[in-house]
Image (cartoon, grey):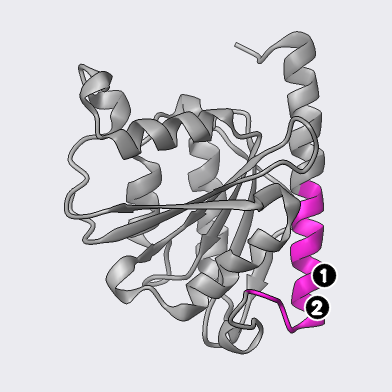
């Protein structure tokens, strides 16, 4: 599947001793807006996403990792990213809206990894737009998509309208209401991630 020049942003960090997170950002690299960068950069201010890592994939996504007969022959970025998804206790998906839907770049990239790598992980959803609708249709469609991958969407979401005026170039949120919603989302993600990680350590995952 050709998805053009896709940029996958993944961030890891420690919020508590057993919590880390992955952030997916769904925009094409050659048309990626500064707004997308500002929203994702904001999460770097939280301890749970303290260490950002960007991986660039040029050209074609030819075959998902779990469909390859010999996964050892998969591209290094794919194997590395899959390992980090598996190691994470929670994820944040940051998405714009594309033709009233999720961006193909986001779904095509996340589909490259097996559902087993995502399963039983909590996920926070952040949508945004440069207009007044805040990407809410993409956010609504993200929940069934993430559920199909086996993830659990936390109750608190965050949809940001007119995003270009709500963040500084350093990713600081200049809008108090948005900042509070993002902080609540992160707190919920940490709570769910910590609870699931604790239960997993005690009893393992359900079959």
How far from the left and from the top, in percent, is residue 78? Answer: 33, 36
Vertical placement of residue 65 versus 162, above or below: above
Residue 183 belongs to magenta span: yes
- Check residue 177 in the rendering and tell me which mark sits there, or answer none: 2
Q: Quadrant of residue 150?
A: top right
Considering the numbered disc 1 on the image, is that residue within a helix, a strand or a loop?
A: helix
Task: Residue 24: give x, y in percent of width and height.
Answer: 49, 52
Horizontal side, residue 124 vs residue 8: left or right: right
Magenta: predominant secondary structure element? helix
Residue at horizontal 51%, vertical 34%? 84
**Where is mark 1, residue-wise?**
180
Q: Identify the disc placed on residue 73.
A: none
- What's the residue at 63%, 74% (across, down)? 171
**Magenta stretch: residue 127 in it?**
no
2 and 1 marks in contact (CB < 8 Å): yes
Crowd band around label 2 with a 10 angstrom C-alpha radius: few (<14), some (14–19), many (20+)? few
As displayed, is residue 125 above or below residue 40?
above
Q: Quadrant of residue 122?
A: top right
Q: Mark 1, residues whose alpha carbon is within 10 Å: few (<14), some, or many (≥20)?
A: few
């Amino acid at each position: 599947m050709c998805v053009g020049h896709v940029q996958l942003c993944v961030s890891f960090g420690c919020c508590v001793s057993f919590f880390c997170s992955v952030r997916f950002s769904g925009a094409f690299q050659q048309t990626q807006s500064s707004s997308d960068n500002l929203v994702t950069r904001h999460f770097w201010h939280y301890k749970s996403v303290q260490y950002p890592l960007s991986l660039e994939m040029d050209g074609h996504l030819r075959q998902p990792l779990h469909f390859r007969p010999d996964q050892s022959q998969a591209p290094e970025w794919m194997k590395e990213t899959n390992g980090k998804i598996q190691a994470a206790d929670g994820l944040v998906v940051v998405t714009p809206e594309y033709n009233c839907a999720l961006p193909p770049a986001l779904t095509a990239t996340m589909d490259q990894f097996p559902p087993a790598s995502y399963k039983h992980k909590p996920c926070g959803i952040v949508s945004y737009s440069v207009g007044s609708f805040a990407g809410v249709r993409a956010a609504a469609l993200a929940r069934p998509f993430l559920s199909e991958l086996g993830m659990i969407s936390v109750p608190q979401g965050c949809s940001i309208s007119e995003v270009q005026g709500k963040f500084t170039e350093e990713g600081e949120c200049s809008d108090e209401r948005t900042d509070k919603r993002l902080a609540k989302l992160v707190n919920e993600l940490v709570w769910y991630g910590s609870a699931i990680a604790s239960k997993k350590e005690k009893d393992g995952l359900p079959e």
